[in-house]
Amino acid sequence: MSNQVNSLKKGLTVKDLVTTGIFSAIFFVFTLVGGLPFAPNPVLTFYMPMGAALLCGPIYLLMVAKVQKRWSVTILGIIMGIIWFATGMHWAFSLGYIGMGLIADLVAGAGHYRNKAINLLSYMLISLGGIYTYVVFFLDPDGWASTMLKNGTEQSYIDTMNASAPSWLLVVIIAGTLAVAAFSGWVGGKMLKKQFEKAGITA
Amino acid sequence: MMGGASSRRGLWLDPRTKILLLLFCILSAMMAPSLFYELGLVVLIGLLGVCFGKWKYAWKGVLFYALIVLLTLWIMDTMTGTWRTMFIAFLGLFHKVYPCGMLSGIVLSTTKVSEFLSAMNRIHAPKKLVIPLAVMLRYVPTIQEDWRFIKDAMRMRDVSPSPKGLLTHPAMTVECIYVPLMMAASKAADELSIASITRGIENPKPRTCLVQIHIGPADLLAGICFAAYLAVGLYWKGVFG
């Protein structure tokens, strides 16, 4: 046990790294499960970040409760970024996860990884990592479709895009993702209290 | 597993080369000037898959992509209005994702964790990142296995693991899925960290590995092929126009 006391100062131990890795795996799978029903559907594809945020709350909160050290959440974000990048997701998606991972880490660190409300807030922030693809899409809809429309962008395409994907959709995506993440984190917090704290799983 | 036997028959590439190929592929998909260029990229990846001895995966992947390309052309021709916009947005994402997803499928199924760790060590990647990444890649199949056991256990206790059960008893079903999965995960984390410390993961000396990794002619050839394809996409766009 003296080892563990030392490690608090030293930073992440091997145990923390392995824990982060395993929870990243579950985080990834649950993001996939939540997001996949949305992604292949042209109408719902914009709401993908909400689906992704729905399932991961308990996992994230348990990981934070188990490790309770700086950088663990950042590593989670970076791994998500790398994996999504390697599976060919849009680069903004990956960068979003890495950036929001760092921010979420800093936020959770402000509560020393023990304050439940702040942990919940940091989960909401990391869930926003998925929206950056859509931010890029809304900033530059022409570039998005240039591969498919050979002679640059048609005027009719621009018109329909403006009609069917208005700018408030982005607000809906962000607000919706935050709301879904808050719900997921709330369920996660309750579950943590009911099941895992009693079992002594949390550190 | 089967991977060991089949990878010996096929081509062997350095994990570092594979990462490089993945990077080239992502860049190519990002800069792709036209649909046919992307189709060519997918065919190139299919050829790589064949070299690795993955015939089935390769031709299925290429065939599926060809169908999607046809579908895209058809939609561009016939559809108008909102539906067209929706499909353009969706297919835009799909065409960007597909080639890289296919390549990373090949890469993940042909790379062993120990090879990956050696390669990462060789390029001096920070251990803090490499260890969780390796653990994660190894743990994903385990989740699948766990999920099957959990489903069986749920059925035994009359909790339905289907969407219908989720709707009728949401709290119960959610708890029955998450709690065992996360319990198993945190147990596995404890055991795995003990095991890896026993096997000397904290050893400050350079890591050794039975499989020697080195960059050979095959690596160079594959790298040049993908780099050339990227260059073609960037500088001779007219060829595919």
Image (cartoon, rainbow, N blue to C red):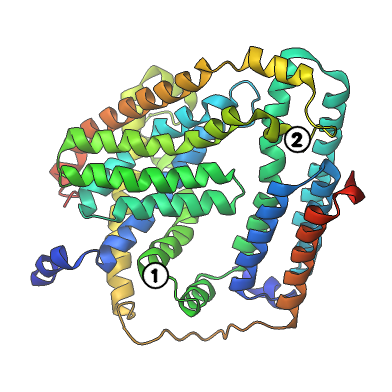
B183 sits to left or right of B73: left
| Residue at position x 75%, y 74% in the image | B10
Residue type, label 1: Pro
The quadrant of the picture occupied by the C terminus of chain B is top right
Name the residue that disc number 1 marks.
B126
Give above or below for B152 relative to B110: above
Name which residue type carries label 2: Ser
The quadrant where residue A107 appears: top left
In x, y percent, where is residue A182? 31, 27
Q: Mark 2 points at which residue?
A: A146
**Could you say where residue B206 lies in the image, as x and y percent from the top left?**
40, 86
- Which is more toward the observer, B149 or A130? A130
Q: Is disc 1 placed on a helix, strand or loop?
A: loop
Q: How many labels does the image show?
A: 2
Relative horizontal placement of residue B171, taking residue B67 as reference (left or right): left
Image point (14%, 63%), residue name: A8
Answer whether residue A41 is visible to the viewer in this image.
Answer: yes
Residues packed near mark 2 inside 10 Å, few (<14), some (14 to 19) or many (20 plus): some
Secondary structure under tag 2 reads loop
Q: Chain letter of disc 1?
A: B
The chain identifier of the residue carrying mark 2 reads A
Q: Are marks 2 and 1 on the same chain?
A: no
Q: Quick check: B1 left or right of B237?
A: left
Query: Residue at (28%, 68%) from the top-left corner?
Result: A14
Q: Where is residue B66 in the image (x, y as percent from the top left)?
A: 84, 42
